[in-house]
Image: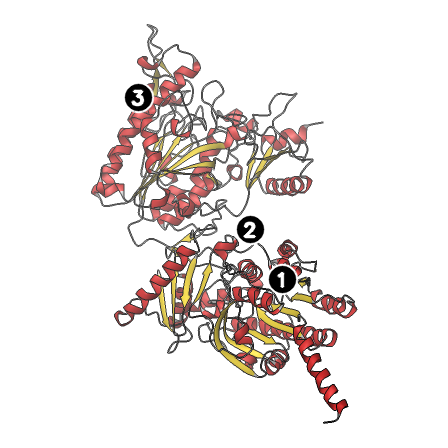
Amino acid sequence: MPLFSAALLLWLGFSAIAAESQPPNIVVFLSDDHTLADSSVYGATDIDTPNMQRLADAGLTFDQAFVASPSCAPSRAALLTGLMPARNGAERNHARPQAEIKKLPAYLQQLGYEVVSFGKVGHYAQTPDYGFDLARHFGYHDDVAVGEAVKWLQARESDKPLCLFVGTNWPHVPWPRATTIDLPSIQIPLKHVHTPETRDARAKYYQAIRTMDDELGQVFDAAYAKLGENTLFIHTSDHGAQWPFGKWNLYDDGIRTPLIVVWPGQTPEKKRTSAMVSWVDLLPTLVEAAGGKPDEKLDGRSIMPVLRGTSDTHRQEIFTTHSGDGNFNVYPTRSVRTERFKYIRNLHPEFLYESHVTKAHKEEAYWNSWVEKAKTSVEAARKVNRYQQRPLEELYDLATDPLEQHNLADDPAHAATRQQLQSKLDAWMSAQQDQQIVYGMPTLLSQAKTPPNVITLFIDDMGWADLSCFGGQDVETTNIDQMAREGLKFTNFYVNSPICSPSRTALTTGHYPARHRITSYLADRKMNERRGMAQWLDVRAATLPRMLSERGYATGHFGKWHLGGQRDVGEAPLITEYGFDASLTNFEGLGPRVLPLCDAYNGKEPQRHDLGSAKLGHGPIEWKDRSQITARFVEETLQFIDAAVAADQPFFVNVWPDDVHSPFYPPEARRGDQTKRTLYLGVLKTMDEQLGLLIERVRNDPKLRDNTLILLASDNGHEPGAGRGGPLRGAKGDLYEGGVRSPLIVWGPGWLDESAVGQTNDTTIVSSVDLVASLIALTGAATPQGYQGDGENLSAALLGKTEAQRNGPLFWRRPPDRPGPPKAPNPDLAVRDGQWKLLCNLDGGAVQLYDLTTDIGEANNIKKQRPRIAKRLKQAVLTWNETLPVDGVAAQESAAP
């Protein structure tokens, strides 16, 4: 061989070795919400993805690649940490991984890489948190990202090896409105319902896939043109598309994802592999490709042997998790998948499965067409019900049932397989330290058992910190404390007004009371008129007792009413006209009444205290020592319950004591020094004993104990000098916390989650209107046509299944007769939204903003430090107020100079 030729061969050999020793450039192109089956590379015949096919022709296509979780944030966090959701901290959608965890950019930067991100790589604004050297255009549908990435790459001059992530938002919704897709050619998946709306939606989805595929081609071409052959190019998607059984689901349409890898000289061309791999495997793979050593503590394992064609297997099992997406999708579930079988455990089968699909905007709501068709089609109904109602366990034989349509979990022939996969999943969840947290507010399915009996104990003018189970130290409320030990306490419960009548209006109607022109206590006719208020609650209003009566409940009201029929207003409707079968009230309502005799034990005759009620007629009247009024209400309640039980009828009962309201007349033995506080405490202790008879009756009766809910709260804050609000600012009549925050106890041994018994929920914000919405849901009551309550169904929180938050804020308008002192007037409006509480006047002035998580006493106005939050909440409460009728507050404002 000539010397020159030998030298040339030697040089070429050294060149090849040198090229191999150089770390590759890495380009990762992420699509968003793309179901694997919806591409021609993976078998679709009605949508062509030519650029995905170009990659497949040039490299290795994975047929069994799986994401760690089928929603954006946890899926991407797993990719960029190499850890599964429970270990990295990003379990629910929109969550971030723990800050101290090392992320992929840091691994590669230590190996000398420049690591750059364009588009949606992390979950939108979270992207910079992962530590990229450069992160741009990561906003929601920031659709210039791909083009800007190509421009940046073409202009790049650095000699550093590059890792470039490019994330398109396609085919994530909203899909394009205009489409060139041929509608008749679209093949509707077998698990979907055939409707014109479904076909139209799939055309838009396919148009989005075409855009994604075109962008993939742009990045693929630019990468090799700029970076050369020593470039590792990966295309994959974060999970399946926003279709039923896709995104947010652990079926293959949700978790099985496209994965194509091109690395000239390293990966084989035009090859497919059936190796099962997980997205957590990509981080250690890229670290190894870059010349590093993957951390053995990661959940992921390098798939380099598969990439190089030396192995066609990787994992024996694939584990996946889903924990929810805010309050849109609250359905935690876990799964394990082998080559042949998949086992899914739905952690809370009592939850209704909901998602953005079922709650879509009207223009995207093909789901509505499914629901409509389900009314006349058995097959459509089966699909709709299967999507929304799921069993505890699901088992599928993927060899014979790749579409996962036939659940074998209860099939004796597959019991051994189910038990084996159960054990594998249990062991894995334990190793992951999976807490199985419910992160959102689910909707509960209707219970198969008898609808619950319901008792509301709505105590008059009791302070937030008066009960000993809520920190009170001056009197022991023994019976209520036992309720709390056996039930669930809420420290963020709010009434919807800081004064009697409007607070009761909210708990009766589920509406903000101002909608009914009841914004302060109902008094005499002239005073009501002067304050711009109604004389009584309109008898035509939709009420909770009427809805429950129509559901078949026996309904009774025993205690203070104060929604009409007081002072000189004698023509108000009877209480029974609002949906109650029976009633017994005090001087603040009509119908049968028990009126108080106030005995000061001073040698004088007890004084009648009825504020003119005895003259109004409309029902039999009995007089009773004021200290025994609650006992009389309880006596009547027990008789009512006995009758309902004898009739085998569920019951709804209001027991609304008024003796904690002034004037305070406890039994003689509890008058003590006769100061206002002492008399109040004596009344409180006596009331606790009297209510104890009712609580014991329910607790000790097997027919009632396991199917009765008791809800205890106060109708507003304490009267100054009598009750106490602890650290809370303000009192009865104020929009500060001391006026509107109330203790709440939910008791129901047969309904509460076992883990919640004896616990305190310090997180969930609940209000009276939410209690109405929740009770409607729990009892299965139907709402009248056109009824739109202001509350949210928070029954899952009330039953201790979650500590998640309500979706929207709460609003208040002050009573028109509580303007406050001239030098320090009371705010007119208030709003609470999560941790924030804002108060202001009707004109938007005198803004106060508090962070209640750090300032429960509302002492530090931070409006200047948080101007954006203050602006948002002020606009929200002013907009809300515009929806309300004018009352005395607005009249005062308009009359001001």
Query: Relative to 439, is 265 on the left or the right?
Result: right
Select label 1 or label 3 by which is in front: 1
Can you say whether 470 is above or below 1 in the image?
above
> Which one is in front in this view, the residue at disc 3 or the one at disc 2?
2
- In space, the residues marked 1 and 3 are separated at their CA atoms by 68 Å
Furthest residue in direction top, as rendered: 603
How many angstroms separate mark 1 from mark 2 (CA)?
A: 17 Å
Q: Nearer the viewer, residue 601 or 18?
A: 18
- The amino acid sitting under disc 1 is Val
* Vertical comparison of 405 with 660: above or below: below
**Residue 876, position in %: x, y?**
62, 43
Residue extending furthest toward the bottom: 1
Report the front residue among 607 and 744.
Answer: 744
Q: Position of residue 323 (x, y in %)?
A: 47, 56
| Residue 584 appears in the figure | no
Q: What label does residue 121 carry, if any?
A: 1
**Label at residue 98:** 2
Quadrant in which the N terminus appears? bottom right
Measure how far apart labels 3 and 2 are at the Cα level: 58 Å
| Quarter residue 133 falls in | bottom right
SS for callout 3: helix
Q: Amino acid at mark 2?
A: Gln
Q: Residue at x 68, y 80 (%)?
A: 16
Instruction: Provide the residue designation for mark 3.
Output: 628
Quadrant of residue 683 in the image? top left
- Any mark on residue 15, and which? none
Residue farthest to the left, as pictured: 646
Disc 1 versus disc 2: nearer the observer: 2
Q: Are marks 3 and 2 in contact (CB under 8 Å)?
A: no
